[in-house]
Image: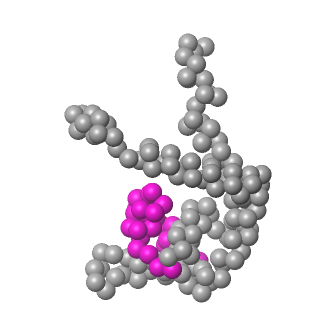
């Protein structure tokens, strides 16, 4: 038995976030499976519905992932005829991704799924937006390196 109350599972912010995230994603998967896409593919499509076209690097940056993680997701979406990849004419190292007609047409179905998930939370719009804003702020705070942390990391 732990001597430290801060080590109790119910006192862990990380576990509360982990459990909540798993619950939300599991609920998404029920409906995303019906239309044949994964949650990761859904995230990439969200970026493209918002921007129409984007580089793999930019998609990765927006989703806070690395490019090697995004590339296979985009390749699968391309095989499903939801996106197309084209090398940039200005820089062949840059791969641009854009929606196909099928990818554009899928947006309406996915919007309905997002509404179902939002409804399942039982949060009113104000609570929903406040929670989302708080989580985004937490992400920004945890992602930004503090001056002291940078010094500790450089000493290792």
Q: Does the image show residue 121?
A: no
Q: Does the image show residue 100?
A: yes
Name the residue at the left extreme.
Answer: 155
The image shows residue 7, relative to residue 66, as above or below, that is: above
Residue 121 x/y as whole percent? 74, 52
Using the image as rendered, state which of residue 140 and residue 56 is in the foreground: 140
Position of residue 10 in the picture relative to residue 98 (left or right): right
**The C terminus sits in image quarter:** top left
Position of residue 141 in the picture relative to residue 129 (left or right): left
Using the image as rendered, state which of residue 30 and residue 119 is in the foreground: 119
The image shows residue 148, relative to residue 119, as above or below, that is: above
Q: Residue at x 75, y 54 (%)?
A: 124
Q: Is residue 155 magenta?
A: no
Residue 46 x/y as whole percent? 57, 69
**What is the magenta range?**
52-80
Position of residue 68 in the picture relative to residue 42 (left or right): left
Q: Residue at x 56, y 64 (%)?
A: 43
Position of residue 80 in the picture relative to residue 114 (left or right): left
Using the image as rendered, state which of residue 103 and residue 142 is in the foreground: 142
Image quarter of residue 30: bottom right
The image shows residue 9, relative to residue 50, as above or below, that is: above
The image shows residue 36, relative to residue 25, as above or below, that is: below
Residue 20 x/y as whole percent? 65, 45
Q: How is the image coloured?
A: one colour
């Amino acid at each position: 038995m732990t001597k430290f109350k801060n080590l109790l599972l119910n006192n862990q912010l990380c576990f509360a976030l982990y459990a909540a995230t798993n619950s939300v994603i599991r609920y998404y998967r029920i409906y995303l499976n019906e239309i044949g896409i994964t949650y990761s593919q859904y995230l990439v499509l969200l970026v493209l519905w918002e921007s129409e076209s984007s580089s793999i690097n930019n998609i990765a940056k927006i989703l806070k992932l690395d490019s090697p993680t995004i590339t296979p997701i985009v390749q699968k979406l391309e095989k499903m005829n939801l996106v197309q990849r084209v090398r940039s004419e200005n820089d062949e190292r840059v791969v641009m991704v854009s929606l196909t007609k099928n990818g554009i047409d899928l947006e309406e179905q996915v919007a309905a799924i997002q509404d179902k998930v939002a409804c399942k939370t039982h949060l009113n719009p104000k609570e929903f937006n406040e929670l989302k804003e708080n989580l985004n702020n937490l992400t920004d705070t945890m992602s930004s390196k503090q001056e002291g942390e940078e010094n500790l990391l450089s000493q290792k």
